[in-house]
Image (cartoon, rainbow, N blue to C red):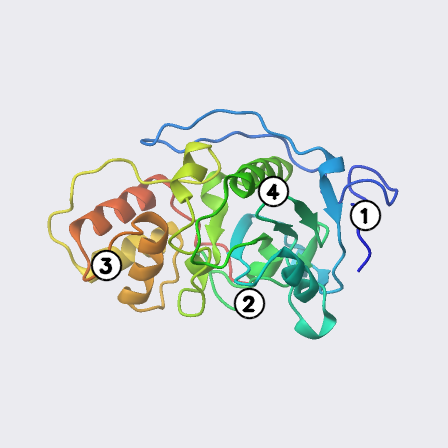
Amino acid sequence: MPAGRSPTAWGSTPTGTASPVTGTRRRSAPRGRPRPIRRRRTIPPSEVIWHPSPNAGARRDGLTPELVVIHYTAMTGAQAALERLCAPEAEVSAHYLIGRDGTLWQLVEEDRRAWHAGTGTWAGRGDVNSRSIGIELDNSGLAPFTAPLMDRLTGLISDIRARWSIPPAGVIGHSDFAPTRKADPGRRFDWRRLALEGQSVWPAGTDAAGTVTEAAFMEAAAAFGYPADEGCQVVLDAFRQRFRPGAHGPLEGEDLAQITDLARRFPVDRTTPAP
């Protein structure tokens, strides 16, 4: 696929950027600890490489982005990922790809539906593709995420959130809504850093819970957004990948305390009919 600068969004010519200008900047910050680092970040259109993928379509039922979904590529490098994300026979894509050196490619315009999510639910609703913007990160899933990549990701998420008025709690991983199928972005991804930057959420310091039950954990997990129809161990594993990457074994009081805190501060709306 030919590479160049992004198409229409700031303007109507092929030399513009594909990022739609909608919504107003809203810098929500996670409450409790960790305290956010407040920084203003904007990615100039000239720093975005337009590399269009045919694997996209219109968002369904008038839906607009309310989530940002983070993935890892699990491939040998960014070039291999670009080729796959743009191959018609692969039937997969994402809105953005970030290389290990911080290079940023845009493959699909933000107002269109990229094919990155697959099946799964968040907040009791499916068709995550129509409700989200997908970001692929050049990482094997085993190695640390590089500093240039994380710096670029933080700025990109900040800009996306401002354009679409997405709260920090709307920034999630693939494994959050598809825990039986996916593990990305994995235990090596620095969710706490993202929360410190005000671009995601993190549990506040809490006392360990008293009576620890799977029912209590699942109730809180569903209130935060996790699929309510999965088994406790499946959801626990997904939760720990993100919030307690060093934890293993049976459900613990710290798991319940953290998910209860998240559910209390960032409850999802499950009253909206599922698409």
Disc nearer the start of the sequence (1/4): 1
Marks 1, 2: nearer the viewer? 1
Disc nearer the start of the sequence (3/4): 4
User: In the rendered view, does 2 fall on the left or right side of 220?
Assistant: right
Marks 3 and 2, Cα distance to the nearest angstrom? 27 Å
Kind of residue at disc 3:
His
Marks 3, 4: nearer the viewer? 4
Answer yes or no: do the residues labelled 1 and 2 have beta carbons within 8 Å?
no
Marks 1 and 2, Cα distance to the nearest angstrom? 28 Å
Q: Which mark is residue 4?
A: 1
Disc nearer the start of the sequence (1/2): 1
Residue highlighted by disc 3: 248
Disc nearer the start of the sequence (3/1): 1
SS for callout 4: loop
* Residue beneath the point at 49% across and 59% down: 140
Disc nearer the start of the sequence (4/2): 4
Residue 141 in percent (x, y) is at: 45, 58
SS for callout 1: strand
SS for callout 2: loop
Residue highlighted by disc 2: 118
Marks 1 and 4, Cα distance to the nearest angstrom? 17 Å
Answer yes or no: do the residues labelled 3 and 1 have beta carbons within 8 Å?
no
SS for callout 3: loop
Examine the image and state in which quarter residue 214 appears.
bottom left
Disc nearer the start of the sequence (3/2): 2
